[in-house]
Amino acid sequence: MTALLWLSFLPWAWGAGPTKGPLTLEAYFEAAQYPFTASHFKAIFGEGRPSEQSNPGFAGAYRGLLARDGRSPLSRLENAKAASLLLNQAVARDGSDPRWRLLRLILEAEMPSWLGLSPHVQEDRAFLNSLLSKRSIEGRFQNGLRSSEDWSKFYKN
């Protein structure tokens, strides 16, 4: 029922299929291809669904889409700041997870530099490039990858 509810608000999600929730890289990158609104965000993080604080990485990424697509400059700025804060929290919680580094890099690379919200671009790019080079030397990770969370297919260095 929950999947159907958010699908009704998210026209882009039909490609993701009803069994996949919005808290995956695939769903995020699908959403990023279309205009994203507060209704979309509320459908994902609204009452009775995953909270922003328990999912700061995806909450920050989706807030970044709100900043990109917002109508008023003030709401765009507020969402950009919230997105930055949430993604920084996700990296602070688990800095070894490449998903959070990738999402933060994408957000910060798109931010105007005068906002002062882009201090980690080089750090995150170096981290992801290091993982890619390690991966090419060792082959696939020993533990295997979460197929829906294979961050490298979304990363363009």
Image (spheres, rainbow, N blue to C red):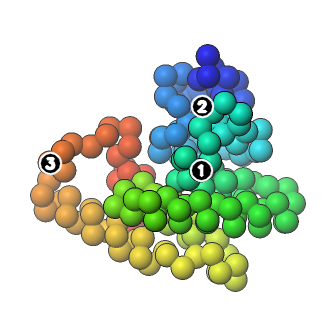
- 52 vs 27, left or right, is right
Q: Position of residue 146 (x, y in %)?
A: 31, 40
Q: What kind of element bears circle 2?
A: helix
Looking at the image, is mark 1 or mark 3 earlier in the sequence?
1
Check disc 1 and give the amino acid type: Gln
Q: Position of residue 47 (x, y in %)?
A: 71, 33
Q: Quadrant of the N terminus?
A: top right
89 or 37: nearer the viewer: 89
Q: CA distance from mark 2 to mark 3?
A: 32 Å
Reading the image, the residue beneath label 3 is 142
Up/down of 14 relative to 143, above or below: above
Q: CA distance from mark 2 to mark 1?
A: 23 Å
Reading the image, the residue beneath label 1 is 53
- 144 vs 63, left or right, is left
Is residue 46 in sight in this rendering?
A: yes
- 29 vs 116, left or right, is left
Looking at the image, is mark 2 or mark 3 earlier in the sequence?
2
Q: Which residue is pictured at 18% across the width and 45% down the height? A: 143
Within the image, what quadrant is residue 74 found in? bottom right
Reading the image, the residue beneath label 2 is 13
Q: Quadrant of the C terminus?
A: bottom left
- 89 vs 126, left or right, is right
Check disc 3 and give the amino acid type: Gln
46 or 76: nearer the viewer: 46
